[in-house]
Image (tube, rainbow, N blue to C red):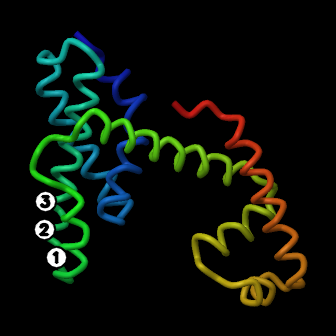
Amino acid sequence: MIKLETVFDTYHKPLVIYCNNIIHNFEVAEDIVSEAFVKLWTKLEEFEQVINARRWLYIATRNAAINYLIKEKKDDNKEKKRLYLFNEEDLSQEDMDNSEIEVNVIFAMLKEIESLPKKCKVIFKLLYFEKLNTLQISRKLNISTQTVLNQKTIAIKIIKEKIKNLKII
């Protein structure tokens, strides 16, 4: 029998990112994944290998995310665009592998962003997470636009170099 702690340590963060990519709500994604692990805990003796639990977790998370979107439909067009990506059949191994690779790349990038020098990290987050432009950032931080551009260049160079050297799979 597999250990829940091992499965949790290995798949919790990637599943949260995977779920967040579907529903675009990080807090709800964390709740959905937590619920999936609770359900897994009640069925743990059914799984002999971690790979089976992994597959079950991805399917359970995907289904819960789709159910969340259905319940939260604020804009039918947005929901239809999201739901067309998913059919009712289980994820294929290739789809699951591709999703896991995507999640691992995103997770690695987020980790590398957090390890950037302070000024680079702040500017990078303002540019790419808060969607501010160079002028807005320079005004907000009381620095020149050239400094913003230089820090952006440094951040991208550092992240590219670190990601290139990572073994993600």
Amino acid at circle 2: Ile
Q: Quadrant of residue 152?
A: bottom right
Q: Position of residue 35 (x, y in %)?
A: 21, 44
Mark pair 3, 1: CA separation? 10 Å
Amino acid at circle 3: Asn
Q: Is residue 49 above or below residue 81?
A: above
Residue wearing tag 1: 73
User: In the picture provided, is 168 more to the left or to the right than 74?
Assistant: right
Q: Position of residue 33 (x, y in %)?
A: 28, 45
Residue wearing tag 2: 70
Q: Position of residue 153 (x, y in %)?
A: 82, 65
Mark 2: secondary structure: helix
**For mark 3, does the 10 Å Cα neighbourhood hold few (<14), some (14 to 19), or many (20 or more) residues?**
few
Tell me, yes or no, whether the two marked residues, 2 and 1, touch with CB atoms within 8 Å. yes
Mark pair 2, 3: CA separation? 5 Å
Front one among 31 and 162: 162
Mark pair 2, 1: CA separation? 5 Å
Residue pictured at 59% horizontal, 43% vertical: 108
Front one among 76 and 6: 76
Amino acid at circle 1: Lys
Tell me, yes or no, whether the two marked residues, 2 and 3, touch with CB atoms within 8 Å. yes
Front one among 149 and 140: 149
Residue wearing tag 3: 67
**Which mark, residue 48?**
none
**For mark 2, does the 10 Å Cα neighbourhood hold few (<14), some (14 to 19), or many (20 or more) residues?**
some
Mark 3: secondary structure: helix
Q: Quadrant of residue 12?
A: top left
Residue pictured at 35% horizontal, 30% vertical: 8
Mark 1: secondary structure: loop
**Mark closest to the chain's N terminus, 3 or 1:** 3
Q: Position of residue 94 (x, y in %)?
A: 32, 36
